[in-house]
Image (tube, helix red, strand yellow):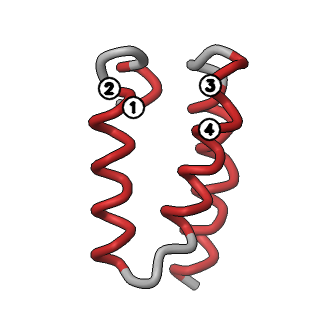
Amino acid sequence: MARGRGARCWVHEMPNILDKVPEAVRPELKAHRVAIRDAADHAQGQRLAGEVMAKYERSYPSAME
């Protein structure tokens, strides 16, 4: 059951994030999101998420919040 809630979270969160960045950035951010979601394990997903946060947090703080 927890997995289902997590999947819904991904589905609903992504449009909210993308709404906070310019159209030109959206494809790159979507690709990062897929890489995080499909990471080999939790540690890799956490590392990738941290890299994305570091890359975008100054330019788009509300999206990375």
Side of 17 relative to 50 (left or right): right
55 sits left or right of 21 in the view: left
Quote the CA–CA distance across marks 3 and 1: 13 Å
Q: Which residue is mark 2?
A: 57
> Which residue matches tag 4?
28
Q: Position of residue 5 (x, y in %)?
A: 58, 69
Mark 1 highlights which residue?
64
Spatial CA distance of label 4 from label 1 is 14 Å
Kind of residue indicated by mark 4: Glu
- Look at 49% across and 62% down and name the residue there: 36
* Other residues around mark 2 within 10 Å, as few (<14) / some (14–19) / many (≥20): some
- Locate residue 2, reporting x and y percent: 51, 80
Q: Earlier in the sequence, mark 2 or mark 4?
A: 4
Q: Quadrant of the C terminus?
A: top left
Q: Nearer the viewer, mark 3 or mark 2?
A: 3
Residue type for callout 3: Val
Residue type at the position of mark 1: Met
Q: Disc 3 on helix, strand or loop?
A: helix
Residue 56 image position (x, y, % from top left): 38, 28
The vertical placement of 57 against 10, above or below, is above
Residue with the mark numbered 3: 25
Residue at (45% x, 83% y) in the render: 40
